Image (cartoon, grey):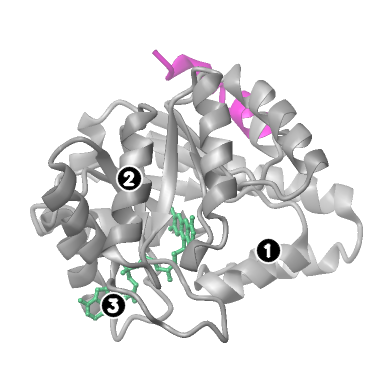
Amino acid sequence: MDSQKKFSPTFSFELFPPQTPQGIEKLRLTRQQLAQFNPKFFSVTFGAGGSTRERTFETVLEIQSEKHVVAPHLSCIGSTQENIRIILEKYYEIGIRRIVALRGDLPSGMAQAGEFRYASELVAFIRKEFGSSFHIEVAAYPEYHPQARSAQADFENFKRKIETGANSAITQYFYNTEAYFHFVDSCEAAGLSIPIVPGIMPINKFSQLVRFSDTCGAEIPRWIRKKLEGYSDDSASIQAFGLDVVTDLCERLLKAGAPGLHFYTLNSANLTSIIWQRLNLKEYVQ
Ligand code: FAD
């Protein structure tokens, strides 16, 4: 973990583009609440295959107009180089300088046409076409990507994203700190000296967490799963226990020198704000 200690901690909040007028209104309130914590940036997800292209752009534009730093996600699977270039040009024109570059997952049933296979190809493309105009974030998987051939192959693939030009990484969420520490130590041993910011998923609903975790390969440790299961539909207890678990996780990560935290807010400020206040993170924010 030593390589991470040299970065001063940054905090960021991930949002998704809402679909309805009510969703847009709710997101404005969420942003207002989260903005008081002075995040380094808000990020906005992008549906693979371009499914949220316009909504992501509109959300990014609105956040930008509020004078917050915003980092759009951009996933390349199913896209042509021309499409990606057009999106990036639009972003550059409106002043965006930070991009979260991803492969994405095609929705089932959608054929894989397109000119990119992996996120490393997107990173290389951005560097080739736009030089150093953008700070590029990529995804990291301390518990390894579910489709990876092996842990070693996945790590080599992660390394390729850094070698082709990524500046920093945000991890998939995890509840096993050892997996993150091991991942960061492997980066250090491989000479990769970029900030690897843990992605933090507050625990809201058990069924939702299981669904996400099954898809993305993040393990819910047995003791946490058993405890959450035991609460059945007592959502107050689930949230109270979840807040203890996630606050403790964040505390251990920051104490060990993690270079920040990236919260998967799911467009809700409530749990993230409580964790923030419990951790007293204002001490870290310059
Ligand atoms: P990659 O880094 O390309 O890796 C994907 C898989 O391919 C891995 O198994 C890797 O080992 C393998 N691989 C990579 N290169 C090679 C190679 N050369 N040869 C063989 N195998 C290779 N999804 C969205 O759709 N929209 C979002 O906005 C979004 N935001 C995210 C934000 C974060 C911080 C994270 C962690 C994930 C996000 N995702 C998002 C999910 C992400 O798109 C999926 O996890 C996707 O399956 C992989 O994307 P990636 O960029 O990590 O892909």
- Amino acid type of the residue that numbered disc 1 sits on in the rendered structure: Leu
Give the Cα separation between the discs numbered 3 and 1: 23 Å
Is there CB contact under 8 Å for labels 2 and 1? no
Say if residue 257 shows up in the picture.
Answer: no
Q: Which mark is residue 151?
A: 3
- Residue displayed at 55% across by 49% down: 54
- Amino acid type of the residue that numbered disc 3 sits on in the rendered structure: Ala
Q: Quadrant of ligand 1?
A: bottom left
- Amino acid type of the residue that numbered disc 2 sits on in the rendered structure: Leu
Instruction: Answer above or below: position of 205 versus 106.
Output: above
Question: What segment carries the magenta color?
Answer: 274-286
- Residue displayed at 60% across by 46% down: 246
Pick the front one: 126 or 183? 126
- Residue displayed at 28% across by 77% down: 151
Q: Which mark is residue 209?
A: 1
Task: First in sequence, mark 3 or 1: give its number.
Answer: 3
Q: Position of residue 152 (x, y in %)?
A: 22, 77
Q: Position of residue 197 (x, y in %)?
A: 37, 44
Helix, strand or loop at mark 3:
helix
* Residue 104, quarter of picture: bottom left
Q: Which residue is mark 2?
A: 88
> Relative to 36, is 231 on the left or the right?
right
Q: Position of residue 222 (x, y in %)?
A: 62, 72
Q: Label 3: few (<14), some or many (≥20) within 10 Å? A: some
Q: Position of residue 149 (x, y in %)?
A: 30, 86
